[in-house]
């Protein structure tokens, strides 16, 4: 049986919930620039893979259709980026949670593959707590927590791995969808301290910080390293969910 809700009939979903598949995982992605070498769907593609692996390891978990558009205002200076307001994305989370509760899902897991979605997740989960007391909501709501999950393992520096279209994300796309990576166009962007430019990035956007939209250096990216990154992130997410360490 597919774990993706949209692949099932309503009868199959009803039977799955009755059999204990009462966790619904909602992964938030984005449609935003990822430098000159990665597609705008990068976060969504990575998010799909993370959702599949996390749900499989957790067990008894179905996966809602991934949200392909998130809150990406900091990238709007780059062509093609689409962005929802925080209130709109929060409202979508609330409506999905209400639907899940109505169908007797016991728990909603809200994760994101894009760092700009956290404010909306916090807002949406707070509203869900008030409006759907029977639904347990477990959500990753803090960018700092996500950055901790994405620490490199010493193969490249944190600056090279980067936080947007650098070695880390490029490696993951090389593992998942190598045909979508424009290796000949890959180039370094901002390679300094990410935390130092985060306030500026969130107020004036990414373009004044990095003209090509890259935070990091994709030069050393590899499919094998991408496989390792994905495995590490999945292990950390599953452990956090099982220990209820994700902030609600």
Image: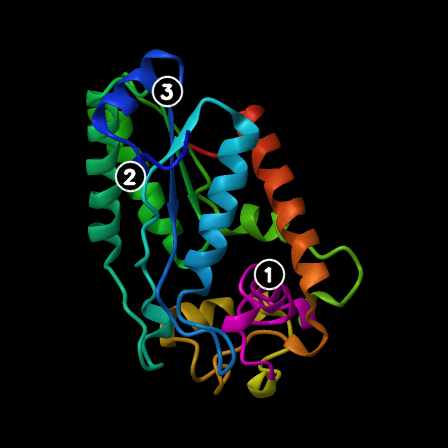
Residue that lies at the very extreme toward the right in this rendered image: 154
Residue 119 lies left or right of residue 113; in this view the side is left
Residues drawn in magenta = 160-183
Coordinates of residue 107 in the picture (x, y in percent) = 37, 23
Coordinates of residue 241 in the picture (x, y in percent) = 53, 30
Foreground residue, 69 or 56?
56
Considering the whole magenta stretch, tell me its main secondary structure. helix
The total of numbered circles placed on residues is: 3
Q: Are marks 3 and 2 in contact (CB under 8 Å)?
A: no
Q: Are marks 3 and 1 in contact (CB under 8 Å)?
A: no
Q: How far apart are marks 2 and 1 (CA)?
A: 25 Å
Examine the rendering and report whether any part of residue 245 can be seen. Answer: no
Compared with residue 156, is residue 192 higher up or lower down, i.e. above or below?
Answer: below
What residue is shown with label 2? 6
- Quarter where residue 20 is shown: top left
- Quarter where residue 188 is shown: bottom right
Coordinates of residue 230 in the picture (x, y in percent) = 62, 50
Instruction: State the SS at label 1.
Output: helix
Instruction: State the SS at label 2.
Output: helix
What residue is shown with label 1? 172
Which callout, 3 or 2, points to the residue nearer the camera? 2
Q: Mark 3 or mark 1, which has the lower sequence index?
A: 3
Compared with residue 248, is residue 27 higher up or lower down, i.e. above or below?
Answer: below
What residue is shown with label 3? 22
């Amino acid at each position: 049986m597919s774990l993706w809700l949209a692949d099932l009939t309503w009868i199959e979903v009803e039977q799955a919930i009755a059999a204990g598949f009462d966790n619904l995982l909602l992964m938030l992605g984005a449609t935003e620039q990822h430098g000159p070498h990665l597609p705008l769907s990068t976060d969504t593609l990575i998010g799909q893979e993370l959702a599949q692996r996390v749900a499989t390891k957790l067990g008894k978990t179905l996966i809602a259709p991934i949200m392909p558009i998130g809150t990406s205002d900091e990238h709007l200076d780059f062509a093609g980026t689409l962005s929802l307001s925080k209130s709109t994305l929060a409202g979508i989370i609330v409506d999905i949670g209400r639907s899940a509760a109505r169908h007797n899902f016991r728990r909603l897991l809200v994760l994101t593959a894009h760092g700009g979605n956290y404010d909306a997740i916090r807002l949406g989960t707070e509203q869900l707590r008030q409006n759907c007391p029977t639904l347990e909501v477990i959500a990753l709501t803090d960018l700092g927590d996500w950055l901790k999950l994405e620490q490199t393992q010493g193969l490249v520096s944190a600056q090279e791995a980067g936080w947007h279209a650098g070695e880390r994300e490029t490696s993951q796309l090389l593992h998942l969808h190598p045909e979508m990576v424009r290796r000949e166009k890959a180039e370094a962007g901002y390679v300094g301290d990410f935390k130092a430019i985060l306030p500026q990035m969130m107020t004036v956007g990414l373009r004044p910080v990095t003209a090509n939209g890259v935070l990091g250096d994709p030069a050393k990216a590899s499919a094998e390293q991408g496989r390792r990154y994905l495995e590490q992130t999945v292990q950390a997410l599953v452990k956090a969910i099982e220990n209820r360490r994700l902030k609600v």
